[in-house]
Image: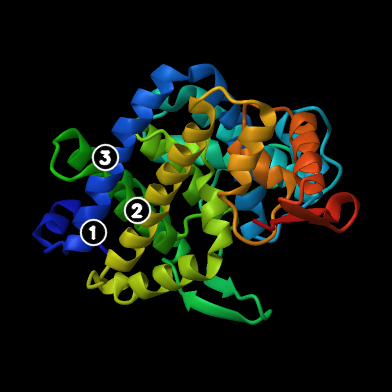
Amino acid sequence: MRTFNYSKINEHKWDSELVGLIAAIYKQAGKQEMYLKQRPGELEKLVEIAKVQSTESSNAIEGIVTTNTRIRQLVEDKTTPKNRNEQEIAGYRDVLNIIHDNFDAIPLTPNYVLQLHKILYSHMNNPAAGRTKSVQNYISATYPDGTTKTLFTPLDPFETPSALESICNEFNRVIGNNELEPLIAITIFIHDFLCIHPFNDGNGRMSRLLTTLLLYRSGFYVGKYISLEAKIAKNKDLYYDALGEAQHGWHEGSEDAVPFIKYLLGTILAAYKDFEDRFALVETKLPALETVRRATQNKIGRFSKQDIRELCPSLSISSIEGALRKLAAMGEVKREGNGKNIRYFRLK
């Protein structure tokens, strides 16, 4: 069976790109801490938006969807799930809320991972919830053209409990002894978790929830304000490609996880940069019209009022709609479509 020793990872010669990603993330994390002290009230509104996006996107990657209105109602816990998809979405919401509120009291152990998985399925009758897999599973990808491909065959069910315990123990050991850079340890753990694929269902969503948990526990809070899941969903093919490339030779312990490490670190850094852009729009108190004007200048191609709301968390949706109407009347943006399909694009 595959063995796990994260200390050996330090023997790897990291290239300048990977080292640069880590340095840039630390720099951005320091900036975020400063920004939060300056404008905690306005930036807290980003949390609501990120929760909706994270819940929607992480489930959508797995083909679990509902309408935008229902997503918001489910995330805000203002409605009862109507079907299986909505039950799964509500479960993700519950786990995400627990992580947001209690991350410092949730150590990484198999027992806690199993409990979080059980909560993920708490709105439905799933006898496999909170238990490691009972049948062999496979990692497959569905591409935009509808084709599917098996990328990897994970561990057998009988090997899974001990492997999950091993990666939790090894992660805690290297973090506790300061033997490995936390960002590297987190990405390696998530990679191993996905290769083990410990559950019959919900592995991808659990990996993204655990990414958020481990980042929070190491002091990287960007996922609270900017949805990492939404960034992964937008480039799902890159996620599958990086994962597939990094899994070659995993069973023999000869894999090169660097492609996946760089992908995940790049996603984290992109989220931090988004946070900085959004802070720039709330840093200076401006009229709604000017705030929305500056937000549209950050967009290329078509965008929705919800896209602008993400950039302007201090404004109500009605203020954003009013500002967009004025910008359209002034000839700065063009509006097209009707109802939910309304989109805008800049003319200047």
**Tag of residue 199:** none
99 vs 174, left or right, is right
Residue at 79% in and 48% down: 328
Q: Is residue 107 above or below residue 84?
A: above
Which quarter of the rendered picture does the C terminus lie within? bottom right
Proximity of marks 3 and 2: CB atoms separated by less than 8 Å: no
Q: Position of residue 274 (x, y in %)?
A: 47, 44
Residue at the spot 53% in from the left edge and 71% down from the top edge: 237
Q: Amino acid at mark 1?
A: Leu
Q: Residue drawn at (80%, 31%), measured in percent from left and top?
A: 318
Can see residue 1?
no
Q: Is residue 322 left or right of residue 196?
A: right
The residue labelled by disc 2 is 265
Which x, y percent locates residue 324?
A: 76, 42
Which numbered disc, 3 or 2, marks the residue that appears first in the sequence?
Answer: 3
Residue extending furthest right? Answer: 338
Distance from Cα at disc 1 to Cα at disc 3:
13 Å
Q: Amino acid at mark 2?
A: Leu
The answer to whether one can see residue 183 in this image is yes
For marks 1 and 3 on the same chain, the one whose residue lies earlier in the sequence: 1
- Label for residue 26? 3
> Circle 1 — which element?
helix
Q: Amino acid at mark 3?
A: Tyr
Label 1 near label 2: C-beta < 8 Å?
yes
Mark 2–mark 1 distance (CA, rounded to whole Å): 8 Å
Instruction: Give the Cα separation between the discs numbered 3 and 2.
Output: 11 Å
Q: Which residue is mark 1?
A: 18
In-front residue for pair 166/290: 290
Query: Does dot 3 land on a helix, a strand or a loop?
Result: helix
Left or right of residue 173, residue 72 in this image: right
The residue under the point 73% across, 38% down is 123
